Amino acid sequence: MLADAAPIVPDDQRAAYQALRAEVDGIDTGDGLPEALTHPDFVLANVGATRAGMVLVDWAGAGRGPRAWSLAFLLYAECAKDLRRGALVMAGYRQHVTLTAEELDRLAGLIRARWLVLVAWQVCSGRVTPAKALADAAETKALADVIASRIRAAPA
């Protein structure tokens, strides 16, 4: 979509658009990481409470992929609200899965990747300018780095 949007990008946004495309081209897609059943929108809005416990809903787009991808999106969604939520997410996650050293090393890139996908879509749909998306990219990278460093430093 981002490539197809090139003809409609205003001249004053062209440099930011090219820089955003380079960011998107560099996304860590999680290739080579351990795989599992993944949920493309694993956030609390897609969790329902039942008598038996919490249940994940809205499985459209689910499939096999890097297991850390869904975790990264959940960490971004929750830590953007409050960094302390990362510890809560990981307390539950670590009851079932131990991340590999490579997953931990690539976590910041995976957290940032989901945001870049969403912001590229926003640019293509005219919701934000390439310049605004690019400006926000630095903030998102900084947040992803903080989240990942906290997760790496937390006791397993």
Image (cartoon, rainbow, N blue to C red):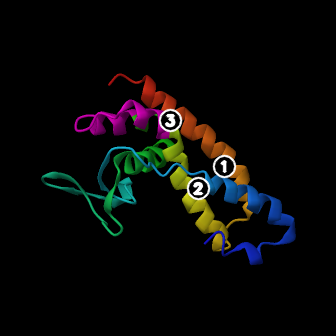
Q: Amino acid at mark 2?
A: Leu
Q: CA distance from mark 1 to mark 2?
A: 8 Å
Q: What SS does tag 2 mark? A: helix
| Residue hosting label 3 | 147
Query: Residue 48, position in %: x, y?
Result: 26, 59
The extreme right residue here reads 12
Viewer-closest of 132 and 3? 3
Start-end of magenta stretch: 87-107
Alpha-carbon distance for marks 3 and 2? 16 Å
Q: Is residue 143 above or below residue 74?
A: above
Residue 137's disc is 1
Q: Residue at x 55, y 33 (%)?
A: 146
Q: Position of residue 104 (x, y in %)?
A: 43, 33
Q: For this view, does 74 lie left or right of residue 54?
A: right
Magenta span dominant secondary structure: helix
Residue 34 location, x and y as percent?
33, 44
Q: Which residue is mark 2?
A: 116
